[in-house]
Amino acid sequence: MAFFFSLQAGSAAKTLIAAALVGAGFTVSGQVAEDYALRERAYALAGSGQCPAAVSAFTQLARNGGDARDWLAAATCAIEAGDPARAVEALQQVLPQRHTLTIDEQLFALRSYAYQAEAYGDWQGVHASWSDAAALSGETRDRLMAARGARLAGQSEEARRGLDGIQPAALAPDFAAIYHDERAHHAAASGRYREALAHIDSAVIAQDAPFRRYQQGLYMVRLGLDRSAAHAFELALASDPDNANILMSLAYAYRTAGNLAAARETYSRAARIEPGMARVAADFL
C-alpha cells in the first residue's frame, strides 16, 4: 500500500482546491466536486484492500481527467486484483504521458507494463518497456531484463551484447537466475548444450523452480544423460505434479533409460491430463 500512498500524495494537487473550498464552507459543484468525491472513494477502497472495486473508481476518474497518476493507480489496483486486461489498458494510457510522473512512478509503470506485456506475448512491448526502464534507472536488473526483452523480440545480437555488460554477482538471486536462464538460452540456440547446462545449473542454485529443473532435464537429454534427465524431470514434477509436458518428457527419459514400466505409467498420467498426448501412445506399447 505504500505505493498507493505515494500516488495519493502526488495526485493531491487535483483535489486540494476543492477540499479547501469545501472546508471553508463553499459549495463546489460540477466535475471538480465529482472528481474530489470519486478520488476520496477510490483511495479509501484501495487503502482498505478492496482493489477490485477501486479499479472501476480509478478508471472512471482517469477517464474524466486523463491524468497519468490516476491511470497508474487504476493499473496498480488491477494488478493487485489479478485483472491483467484492465492493468494493460490502464498502463497503455500511462506510458505516453509518463514524463509527468516521478522517476519511481515511471519505473513502476514501465516495469509493470513489461511484465504484463510478456504475459500477453507482446514481445516488442516487453523490449521497449525494459529498454526505457534501463535508460531511466541504469540499474543492472533493468539492463538484464532489457537484454531478455531484446531476445524475446528477436534481437539476438542486441540481447547478447546486453548480457556481456552484466556481472551476475551484482544481482539479487532471482535476477541472477534470470541472467543464467538467458545465457543458457543463447548457448543452446548455438548448439552448445554443455554450456547451456552449466548455466541452467547455476540458475537452479540461485533460485530453484520447476521450469528450471525441466529445462535442465531437456539439456541433459540433448547430451545423452538420460538417467540424470529423468531425475531432473522428477524434481520438476514434485513441485508441479499436474504438468503434462513434464510428465511426457519424464516418460521418454524413462523409456530411453530402459525403465519401460515407469515410462508407460508416466505416459498414462500425462495422457489423462492432456488427452491430445494420446497420439504418441505407440511409443509406450
Image (spheres, helix red, strand yellow):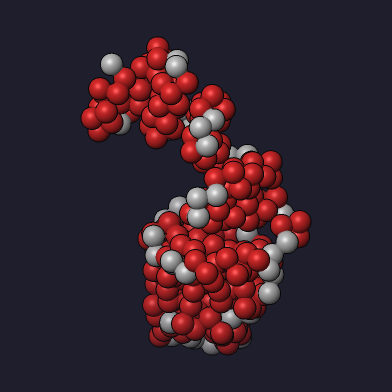
Depth order, front residue of 152/106: 152
Occupied quadrant, residue 283: top left
Instruction: Return the x and y of residue 191 as percentages of the image width and height.
Output: 50, 50
Point out residue 64 in the picture as x, y percentages from the top left corner: 40, 80
Q: Quadrant of the N terminus?
A: bottom right
Q: How many marks?
A: 0
User: In the rendered image of this protein, does residue 13 appear above or below residue 82?
Assistant: below
Up the image or down, 211 lies above or below 93; here it is: above
Residue at the spot x=40%, y=12% of the render? Answer: 261
Tell me where residue 50 appears, x and y as whole percent. Answer: 50, 54
Relative side of 240 to 263, left or right? right
Q: Quadrant of the C terminus?
A: top left
Q: Residue furthest right?
A: 169
Q: Does the rendering let one see residue 75?
A: no
Residue at 50% in and 55% down: 190
Q: Position of residue 143 (x, y in %)?
A: 63, 68
Residue drawn 42% across the image and 70% down it: 124
Residue 201 is left or right of residue 112, and the answer is right
Foreground of the two, 165 or 133: 165
Image quadrant where residue 122 sits? bottom left
Q: Is residue 66 left or right of residue 108?
A: left
Residue 26 visible here = yes
What's the residue at 55%, 38% (across, down)? 216
Q: Nearer the viewer, residue 160 or 132?
A: 160
Quarter occupied by residue 89 = bottom left
Viewer-side residue, 67 vs 34: 67
